[in-house]
Amino acid sequence: GPHATGNILLRYTNSAECPLYGIAEDRLQLVVDGTTCNYEVATHAIMVDNFDMVDDISAPRLAISKNIIKFGEVNDHNEVIERSVELRNEGATPLVIRAVEVESAAVEVRVGDIMSIAPGQMRVVTFVLRGALIEDWDNPLTSRALVITNDPLRPMQTIRLTALPL
């Protein structure tokens, strides 16, 4: 009847043959009794591995050398600034970098070709800020990078990114 409520269960299923990792966003239009509703339902999911069968003792463990990257002052629209972090595997089995996603269009991420890190080893990830791609020069740039791995305890870790356009 009127004013009744209900639940909608949304489930994302990742293909084993061609898995997707990182942010998945969708906008859904509801149709009730053949009539399209006026508002949309927005979904925001972060796709990670299914860890149901993982043995925690031998699992990989991601340690990131710093959780904030400060590009500092950007004085020139043509300026290009690079900063790096180390991703270290402190676990007992290979750590696989599934995705590194950056929110800001002004920041490019360079991970390299080798996405697996052996136990006790590390990999350098470089973030490149391009002044020419900063949209708002009147305010500080604050963004984040999402690091998605097969670490079952923390499959998604966040690195904050900041810059000060002058």
Image: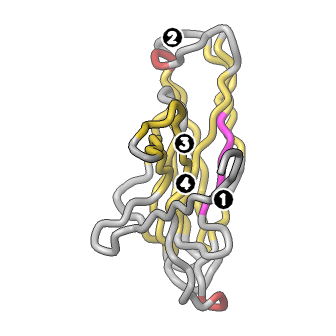
Q: Quadrant of residue 152?
A: bottom right
Q: Amino acid at mark 2?
A: His
Contact between marks 2 and 1 (CB within 8 A): the answer is no
Please provide percent x and percent y for residue 87: 58, 61
Q: Residue at x 54, y 47 (%)?
A: 43
Please provide percent x and percent y for residue 102: 52, 41
Q: CA distance from mark 1 to mark 3?
A: 35 Å
Q: Quadrant of residue 121?
A: bottom right
Q: Give the SS element for disc 2.
A: loop
Residue toward you, 105 or 51: 51
Q: Residue at x 68, y 56 (%)?
A: 65
The single residue placed furthest to the left in the displayed view is 17
Contact between marks 1 and 3 (CB within 8 A): the answer is no
Tell me if residue 23 comes above or below residue 132 in the rendering. Answer: below
Q: Which residue is under mark 1? A: 64
Q: Residue at x 50, y 26 (%)?
A: 106
Q: Amino acid at mark 3?
A: Val
Q: Which residues are magenta?
A: 156-161
Q: Is residue 131 visible?
A: yes
Q: Is tag 4's residue or tag 1's residue first in the polypeptide sequence?
A: 4
Q: Residue at x 55, y 54 (%)?
A: 45
Describe residue 70's horizontal placement relative to residue 110 as left or right: right
Q: CA distance from mark 3 to mark 4?
A: 13 Å
Q: CA distance from mark 2 to mark 4?
A: 34 Å
Tell me if residue 116 comes above or below residue 87 in the rendering. Answer: below
Q: Which residue is under mark 2? A: 77
Q: Which residue is under mark 3? A: 41
Q: CA distance from mark 3 to mark 2?
A: 38 Å
